[in-house]
């Protein structure tokens, strides 16, 4: 009984902190319409700042707390709102997703750079050593404070939102932003306030959790998945339900620690519980209604003709051959890596660029592909590539099913949860904690591509073939269907299209492509390890293809090149640590608003230079039966 | 047995009854009108019929089958097609591609072996937009984009066509031709349910008209009867007899 009580109290404490974090998420989401994926990273940063003041500079706890909670956190939140989020508002979910993910990666990069994870750090509890005895269980003051803080937050939020002018203005902004402005309200000031408030709540959660969780940048950042899960229980709207969800999750975790076996498969359930919880909640959410009444027409890049594809493809392979022969060592390795990433990014061009869906777990599919290919003859046979595609495709179909009934945000959340879940339950098992797996390079019809140059050229050939495959889809009925579905899902449904099945299909196809990418990614370094596929890598890959240009095959190539050789060259010349996180994060925050990344910017500039959007005689020459896409848009 | 029967459908949005016990039928071979002032619930009723909005209570039947539990795409496969008051065109595609997608979707579920490209050309021709077929739809004037939606709906080869203010944005001549097309389609056996503010057009093409006001059906009958109905006049002109007519005819 004592044991049960002890676990219950631990659970309530954890749940209380989750509730604080989750309520911050809800406050910013409801007032600005932006789901802040960087919420946890902000909490992480604030916890580290608190540590810096409290432990490193030896400030007294009250001063450090006041500085972080009432000065730094609100200012930081307001700054983020002013600089980043204000520009994003009103744009599609995809853009705000990229900006907050960019911020997330950037803050992780900052955290890792400023507080090197190799140094041990400990966060002191509040009033460490003091305990109270409640029914034969020792409860620390820190734990009691956590519960009290959550209670205070609940009451204060209720009072602020329902009793103060500002709170009422906040709720008015949620209901109708423009109308609030017309009535003399100031929506932008209100959302700056809500971001300040959200950041404060994230900071409180981070500081309370750090003593128990340890000062780890990644762990603290992703504690927030638990907050996501709790916030989803309240459907990102209801604070009471969010608190209930947080409590249920905290208790579940505590009991899992207490009563599940400490070894074997089940022992991994505990760190995965928030993700499993999130999946379960998503299963029970009501299906969203299809929205009607929006006219969407994104500027779509021109689709190159087959001759152009052939010429550019051949040039790419020959160019790769020439460059690969000229360089060696790490330079060549980074070049190959860039191409492999390009192949992986093609799967995102299909899924996100054409299909308008998001996946935050693409590197997980890559990992599944690589593992399967390595089981089949260590990756050296073409059957391994096929098996990789099949396995990743099937997993993709299964995990996308529950979320695809819902909106894009939920798909992003559940794929993120799946990525973390796969880290804990799959990759750590397969690789046995840090160990690598041998991976041979492909041999095809008796030809081995073992040499570094040969393998690099092979990667370029694979990129060209997969790029042509993606373009073939775009040109055909399925590509047309994807464009239609992106513009108006409701119209597609009323024409008899089963939206869910189509979305699952494209998600599975994209996952299978990522699996193929994995089979080739594995051959790069001769071995694979769980680090290659850790969840943040998926974010990096998604952001880099967005920066390159997610609507086009050329954007995938550029994204790969930036991520591989691009960052390699920068880090060789400038001494910046964590360049991948910082660069991808910064780049995504900068470019997320232009729909097709750098490629879009370049072709846009090129068009303005030519000043001749589309030649009329070209249009007239097109036969009726010919593919009409070639005259869709004048983007080069 | 009517092709479409709406039975005692009510929809509540919070404290507002958007529809209250609405009954309505539509039959093959004729254009059925659905009119009423703005906010009367016409579009909501369309959403209920096509499966985009769950009713709070009531049923929708297609022939003798209760389709209330079916999803939008399942109802479409039973022969329902519609246009939208606020356009839902595929903006990034051309008019031809818009129609082609519809024909391709239909071929996929009906497996009727039709040639989507032929279907698309026939429908474009019929609606009279072949000359604009290669234009992107998001750059089109509203009236033309509405015709694209009509063509797209026809490409699904429906038995029941629901048109939500298809005539707004058309000029007098175009409206005339549009009315002819509706009559022609009805003659071929299509059931058409028409929401339209252009009273002249409605009176010309509809055999039967239902009138909604504040979510309730206030009248039903042939055009001559509807024109003379005092409740309909009150609904359109307001309770005050001296009030200026509002919204009864949207200038075309």
Image (cartoon, coloured by chain):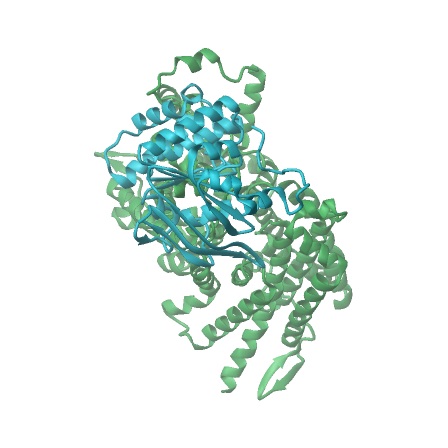
In this rendering, position of residue A457 left or right of residue A101 = left
Point 24% across, 36% down: residue: B112
Can residue B51 be seen in the rendering of this structure?
Answer: no
| Residue at the top extreme of this rendering | A617
Q: Measured along the vertical axis of the image, is residue B118 above or below residue A118?
A: above
Query: Where in the figure is residue A28, as x and y percent of width and height?
Result: 64, 54
Can residue B45 be seen in the rendering of this structure?
Answer: yes
Query: Where in the figure is residue B106, as x and y percent of width and height?
Result: 31, 37
In this rendering, position of residue A596 left or right of residue A142 = left
Q: Measured along the vertical axis of the image, is residue A270 above or below residue A573?
A: below
Q: Nearer the viewer, residue A362 or A62?
A: A362
Indicate the quadrant where residue A215 lies: bottom right
Q: In the figure, what tint was chain B given?
A: cyan
Point 49% across, 70% down: residue: A253
Question: Judging from the image, what is the letter of the chain drawn in green?
Answer: A
In this rendering, position of residue A65 left or right of residue B54 = right
């Amino acid at each position: 009984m004592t044991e049960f009580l002890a676990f219950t109290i631990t659970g309530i404490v954890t749940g209380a902190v989750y509730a604080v974090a989750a309520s911050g998420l809800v406050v910013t989401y409801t007032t600005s319409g932006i789901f802040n994926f960087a919420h946890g990273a902000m909490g992480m940063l604030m916890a580290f700042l608190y540590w810096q003041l409290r432990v490193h500079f030896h400030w007294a706890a009250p001063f450090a707390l006041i500085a972080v909670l009432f000065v730094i956190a609100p200012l930081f939140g307001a700054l983020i709102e002013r600089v980043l989020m204000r520009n994003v508002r009103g744009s599609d979910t995809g853009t705000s997703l990229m900006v907050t993910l960019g911020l997330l990666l950037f803050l992780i990069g900052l955290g890792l750079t400023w507080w090197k994870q190799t140094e041990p750090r400990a966060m002191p509890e509040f009033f460490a050593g003091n305990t109270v005895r409640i029914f034969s269980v020792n409860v620390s003051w820190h734990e009691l404070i956590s519960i009290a803080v959550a209670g205070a937050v609940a009451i204060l939020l209720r009072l602020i939102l329902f009793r103060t002018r500002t709170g009422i203005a906040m709720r008015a902004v949620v209901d109708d932003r423009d109308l609030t402005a017309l009535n003399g309200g100031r929506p932008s000031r209100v959302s700056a306030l809500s971001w300040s408030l959200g950041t404060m709540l994230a900071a409180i959660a981070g500081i309370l959790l750090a003593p128990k969780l340890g000062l780890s940048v990644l762990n603290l950042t992703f504690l927030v998945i638990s907050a996501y899960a709790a916030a989803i229980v309240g459907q990102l709207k209801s604070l009471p339900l969010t608190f209930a969800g947080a409590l249920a999750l905290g208790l579940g975790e505590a009991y899992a620690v207490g009563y599940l076996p400490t070894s074997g498969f089940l022992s991994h359930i505990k760190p995965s519980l928030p993700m499993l919880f999130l999946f379960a909640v998503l299963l029970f959410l009501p299906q969203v209604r299809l929205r009607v009444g929006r006219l969407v027409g994104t500027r779509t890049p021109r689709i190159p003709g087959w001759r152009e594809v052939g010429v550019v493809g051949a040039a790419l392979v020959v160019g790769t051959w020439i460059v690969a022969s000229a360089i060696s060592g790490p330079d060549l390795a980074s070049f190959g890596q860039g191409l492999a990433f390009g192949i992986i990014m093609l799967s995102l061009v299909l899924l996100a660029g054409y299909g308008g869906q998001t996946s935050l777990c693409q590197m997980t599919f890559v990992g599944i592909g690589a593992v399967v290919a390595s089981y089949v003859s260590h990756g050296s046979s073409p059957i391994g590539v096929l098996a990789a595609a099949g396995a990743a495709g099937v997993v993709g179909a299964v995990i996308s099913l529950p979320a695809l009934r819902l909106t894009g945000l939920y798909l992003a959340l559940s794929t993120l949860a799946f990525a973390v879940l796969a880290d804990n339950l799959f990759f750590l098992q397969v690789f046995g904690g840090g160990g690598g797996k041998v991976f041979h390079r492909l041999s095809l019809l008796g030809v081995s591509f073992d040499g570094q140059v040969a393998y690099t050229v092979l990667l370029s050939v694979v990129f060209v073939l997969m790029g042509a495959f993606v373009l073939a889809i775009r040109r055909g009925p399925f590509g047309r269907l994807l464009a239609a579905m992106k513009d108006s899902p409701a119209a597609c449904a009323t024409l008899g299209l089963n939206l869910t099945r189509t979305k699952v299909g494209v998600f599975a196809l994209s996952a299978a492509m990522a699996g193929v990418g994995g089979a080739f990614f594995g051959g790069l370094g001769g071995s694979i390890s769980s680090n290659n596929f850790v969840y943040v890598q998926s974010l990096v890959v998604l952001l880099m293809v967005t920066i390159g240009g997610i609507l086009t095959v050329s954007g995938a190539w550029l994204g790969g090149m930036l991520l591989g050789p691009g960052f390699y060259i920068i880090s060789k010349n400038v001494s910046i640590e964590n360049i991948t996180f910082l660069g991808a994060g910064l780049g995504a925050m900068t470019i997320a608003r232009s729909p097709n990344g750098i490629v879009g910017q370049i072709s846009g500039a090129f068009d303005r230079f030519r000043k001749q959007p589309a030649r009329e005689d070209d249009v007239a020459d097109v036969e009726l039966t010919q593919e009409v896409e070639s005259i869709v848009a004048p983007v080069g | 047995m009517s092709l479409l029967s709406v039975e005692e459908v009510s929809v509540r949005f919070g404290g507002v009854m958007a529809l209250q016990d609405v009954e309505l039928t539509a039959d093959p071979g004729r254009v059925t009108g659905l009119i009423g002032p703005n906010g009367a619930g016409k579009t909501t009723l369309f959403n209920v019929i096509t499966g985009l909005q769950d009713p709070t209570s009531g049923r929708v039947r297609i022939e003798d089958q209760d389709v209330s539990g079916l999803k939008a795409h399942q109802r479409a496969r039973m022969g329902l097609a519609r246009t939208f008051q606020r356009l839902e065109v595929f903006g990034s595609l051309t008019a031809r591609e818009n129609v082609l997608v519809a024909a391709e979707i239909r071929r996929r579920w009906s497996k009727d072996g039709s040639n989507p490209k032929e279907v698309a050309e026939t429908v474009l021709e019929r609606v009279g937009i072949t000359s604009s077929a290669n234009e992107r739809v998001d750059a089109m004037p509203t009236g033309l984009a509405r015709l694209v939606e009509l063509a797209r709906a026809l490409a699904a080869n429906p038995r029941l066509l629901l048109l939500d203010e298809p005539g707004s944005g058309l000029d007098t001549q175009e409206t005339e031709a549009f009315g002819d097309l509706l009559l022609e389609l009805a003659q071929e056996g299509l059931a058409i349910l028409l929401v339209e503010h252009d009273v002249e057009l409605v009176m010309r093409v509809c055999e039967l008209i239902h009138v909604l006001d504040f979510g309730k059906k206030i009248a039903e009958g042939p055009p001559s009867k509807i024109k003379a109905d005092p409740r309909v006049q009150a609904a359109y002109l307001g309770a005050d007899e001296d009030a200026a007519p509002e919204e009864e005819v949207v200038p075309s």
